Image (cartoon, helix red, strand yellow):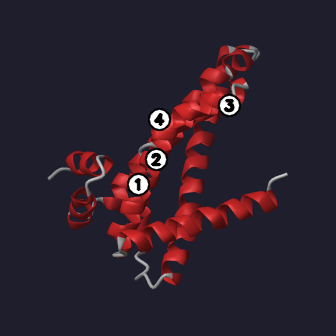
Amino acid sequence: MSLVVNLLRAWRLNEVGYQQLKDINKSFTGGVLVVGTVGLAYGLTNIVLFRDLLAMMSSKASEITGALAIIISGLFIAYLVHISLVLVTWAISKGFKGPGHFGLLYGNLGIAMAPLVFAVPLLNYLWLSGKGGVAYLAVLPFLVWLWVALVQAIKAAEGHSFGLATGVLLVTIVFTGCLLYLWLP
């Protein structure tokens, strides 16, 4: 089976996709591709949202350079957030008596980030446009999909039961939320 077929299986919340990606040693590659796509989506959304600012650059070359810098920063942010999430999830999973397959967890959590390809641009637009309240409900289906995909990714990588994988994800989110609360102004 090819990488693409198994990625589609995993995104349809079919755990067999994760297992077959592991068997053909493509979890890491799939994770890197998906996280890169999320980073590109974030960077391209920023280019669209800041097009007026980019248009004010002194020359076409500086406008292109500015756009490339935004795309590269989007990729950098996506990979940095991903490795941070993997590290925290790995540590918490070890605390829940998981085997600690860091590389497999890296790939599986990256693959599970597919819903963010849709959610990140939408959230970015809503945040920067000042829209609020009910408009954020449009992101809810993607976040539910993300939650279930992350639980399945943890379950497939660490061999936890569904309940234990849900617990690992819940503790990861609470821990990350506490860190953000402490460190962000």
Is the residue 43 above or below the residue 157 in the image? above
The residue at the point 66 percent across, 18 percent down is: 51
Amino acid type of the residue tagged 3 in the rendering:
Gly
Left or right of 160? Residue 46 is right
Per the image, label 2 sits on a secondary structure element best described as: helix
Distance CA(mark 2)–CA(mark 1): 6 Å
The residue that disc 2 covers is 144
- Check disc 1: other Cα within 10 Å, few if <14, some if 14-19, many if 20+: some
The residue that disc 3 covers is 133
Is the residue 127 above or below the residue 99 in the image? above
The residue at the point 45 percent across, 85 percent down is: 97
Q: Is residue 103 visible?
A: no
> Are dots 2 and 1 in contact, CB under 8 Å?
yes
Among the two numbered marks 1 and 4 on one chain, the one whose residue lies closer to the N terminus: 4
Among the two numbered marks 3 and 1 on one chain, the one whose residue lies closer to the N terminus: 3
The residue at the point 24 percent across, 45 percent down is: 4
Left or right of 134? Residue 108 is left
Q: Which mark is residue 148?
A: 1
Tell me residue 143's x, y (percent): 50, 45
Distance CA(mark 1)–CA(mark 4): 16 Å
Amino acid type of the residue tagged 1 in the rendering:
Val
Q: Nearer the viewer, mark 2 or mark 4?
A: 2
Tell me residue 139's x, y (percent): 53, 36
The residue that disc 4 covers is 118
Per the image, label 4 sits on a secondary structure element best described as: helix
Per the image, label 3 sits on a secondary structure element best described as: helix
Outermost left residue: 1
Tell me residue 75's x, y (percent): 55, 44
Per the image, label 1 sits on a secondary structure element best described as: helix
